[in-house]
Amino acid sequence: MRPLIRSLFLLSLAVAPLAAAANPVAETVSPTGVMTAVAADAVSVVPGTKDVALVESDVQKLEATIDGLRREVAQLQEREEARARVIGDPNNHSLWP
C-alpha cells in the first residue's frame, strides 16, 4: 500500500504544474502584428559586441567559480581519505550494530 501512495504522491507532483497552467487562448493576430514580431525577432538574433563580451566575462567568472569549487571538493576528499587512513572506516567496527 505504501508504494502505491508514494507513486500517487509523485504523480500528483508531476501533474501539478500542468493543472495549474492556464488554458491557452487563441488570439486573433493581424498580419501586420505578425510581421512586426518577426522583424523584431530577426533584429534581436544578431548579437552585439557588447553582448558577446558580457557573455564571455560571465563564462570566465563561472569557470573560475567552478575551478574554486573543484579545488574545495578535492581538499575535502583528501581530508576524508587521510582521516580514513588514520582512523579507519567509522562504520566498520566490531561493536557497530
Image (spheres, rainbow, N blue to C red):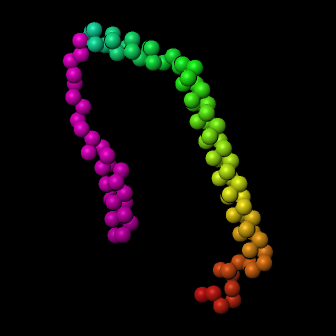
Q: Position of residue 14 (x, y in %)?
A: 36, 50
Drawn side of residue 55 relative to residue 11, left or right: right
Q: Could you tell me what secondary structure mostly forms the magenta stretch?
A: helix
Identify which residue is drawn at 74% across, 74% down.
83
Q: Closest to the observer: 97 or 75? A: 75
Q: Closest to the observer: 4 or 63? A: 63
Identify which residue is drawn at 63% across, 47% down.
65
Specify start and end residues of the magenta stretch as a single range. 1-30
Vertical order, 85 against 28 (above or below): below
Q: Closest to the observer: 45 or 93? A: 45
Identify which residue is drawn at 64% across, 37% down.
60
Vertical order, 5 against 56 (above or below): below
Vertical order, 96 against 61 (above or below): below
Q: Position of residue 64 (x, y in %)?
A: 66, 44
How many numbered marks appear?
Answer: 0
Q: Position of residue 62 (x, y in %)?
A: 61, 42
Vertical order, 82 against 47 (above or below): below
**In the figure, residue 4 lies in which quadrant?**
bottom left
Q: Is residue 47 magenta?
A: no
Identify which residue is drawn at 48% across, 18% down.
45
Drawn side of residue 47 relative to residue 76, left or right: left
Question: Looking at this rendering, what residue extends furthest in the bottom direction?
Answer: 95
**In the figure, residue 93 lies in which quadrant?**
bottom right
Q: Quadrant of the C terminus?
A: bottom right
Q: Quadrant of the N terminus?
A: bottom left
Q: Closest to the observer: 36 or 51? A: 51
